[in-house]
Amino acid sequence: GAVVSQHPSRVICKSGTSVKIECRSLDFQATTMFWYRQFPKQSLMLMATSNEGSKATYEQGVEKDKFLINHASLTLSTLTVTSAHPEDSSFYICSARAVGGRNQPQHFGDGTRLSIL
Amino acid sequence: GENVEQHPSTLSVQEGDSAVIKCTYSDSASNYFPWYKQELGKRPQLIIDIRSNVGEKKDQRIAVTLNKTAKHFSLHITETQPEDSAVYFCAARDPDVTGANNLFFGTGTRLTVIP
C-alpha cells in the first residue's frame, strides 16, 4: 500500500519550454503533497507544500511564478516548471502525506529527472 | 524550526563490516525519526524509524538508536553488503512547527560497501 506515482520519470526539452510533472497517490488520499528538488550529491530541498483545494506554500527563495503547483484533488498534485532554463535541470521528487494529520508518514514518488538543453 | 545535521557525508566500508551514520537535531520537541535509503536516481525509501518514547529499534541488520537528552540518533548497519551502497538520509519530525511541513532532512551520507 501507500504508492505514489510520479510522471514523467524523465524529461529532456529545449530552453523556454514549460514542463508539467504529475504526482498521484494511487491507493490513499493525500491532503498534503510536497515537492522537493535534489541536486547531485545533495539532500532533498523542499520547494513547496501543496494543499488540496488551496494555494501552495512556497519555501523561501522558490519562485512561485516559475514553479506552478496545483493540487486539484486528494490524489493529484502537479508541478509546472514554466519557461524552463538549463539551471532548472534537476531531480524533482514529490511526496504525499495521507489524510489524518501531520503525523502521517510521507511516501515518495520515483522522481522526475528534468534536463533542459 | 528544526535543524538536522548528518555525519559523515561519505562512508566507505569493507563488505561484512559495520557502518554507523549519526544525526543530531536541534528541537527537543521532535518526536519521530525516520531513515531513508536512496539509490541513484530512485526514490527515498523508508528503511527504519524510531519514535521518541523508544531508545533503540532493530530490524535484521539495521538498527537505530536515539538519545533524547543529547538530541542525536544513529543508524547502524551490520554485516554490510554491496547492495547496501546508497545514500542514506535521516530526518526529524517536529510537531511544534507551524505550517504543513514538519519533516526535516539531514544532508545525506553516501555509503559505499567495497566487496
Image (cartoon, coloured by chain):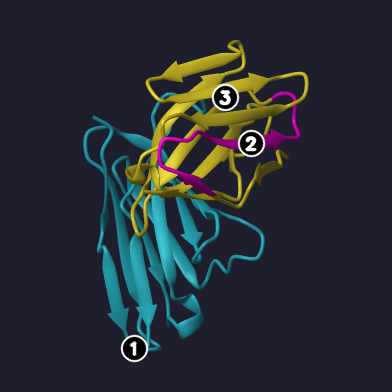
Chain colours: A cyan, B yellow
Picture quadrant of residue B61: top left
Tell if the residue under mark 3 belongs to the same chain as the one under mark 2: yes
Pointer 2 indicates a residue of which chain?
Answer: B
Q: Of helix, strand and loop, which one carries label 3?
A: strand
Q: Earlier in the sequence, mark 3 or mark 2?
A: 2
Q: Mark 3 = which residue? A: B32
- Is circle 1 on the same chain as circle 2? no
**Residue A52, can we see it?**
no
Element on which disc 2 rests? strand
List the residue tagged with mark 1: A14
Q: Position of residue B50 (x, y in %)?
A: 53, 21
- From the top left corner, tell me how far across and down residue A64 is, in percent: 54, 66
Marked residue chain, label 3: B
Residue in front for this viewpoint, A103 or B33: B33
B102 over B70 or under it: above or below? below
| Amino acid tagged 1 | Lys
Residue ID for mark 2: B22
Q: CA distance from mark 1 to mark 3?
A: 42 Å
Marks 1 and 3: which is nearer the front? 3
x and y, in percent, of residue A12 in the image: 29, 79
Whole-number angstrom distance, CA of label 1 to CA of label 2 = 42 Å
Q: Which residues are magenta?
A: B12-29
User: Label 3 is placed on what type of residue?
Assistant: Tyr
Above-or-below relation of B53 to A15? above
Going 73% across and 40% down the picture, which residue do you hit? B1
Dot 1: chain letter: A
**Amino acid tagged 2:** Lys
Q: Please tell me which residue lies in front, A36 or A41.
A: A41
At 69% from the left and 29% from the top, the residue drawn is B72
**Badge 2 local density, few (<14 within 10 Å), some, or many (20+)?**
some
Quarter of image, res B33: top right
In magenta stretch: residue A104: no
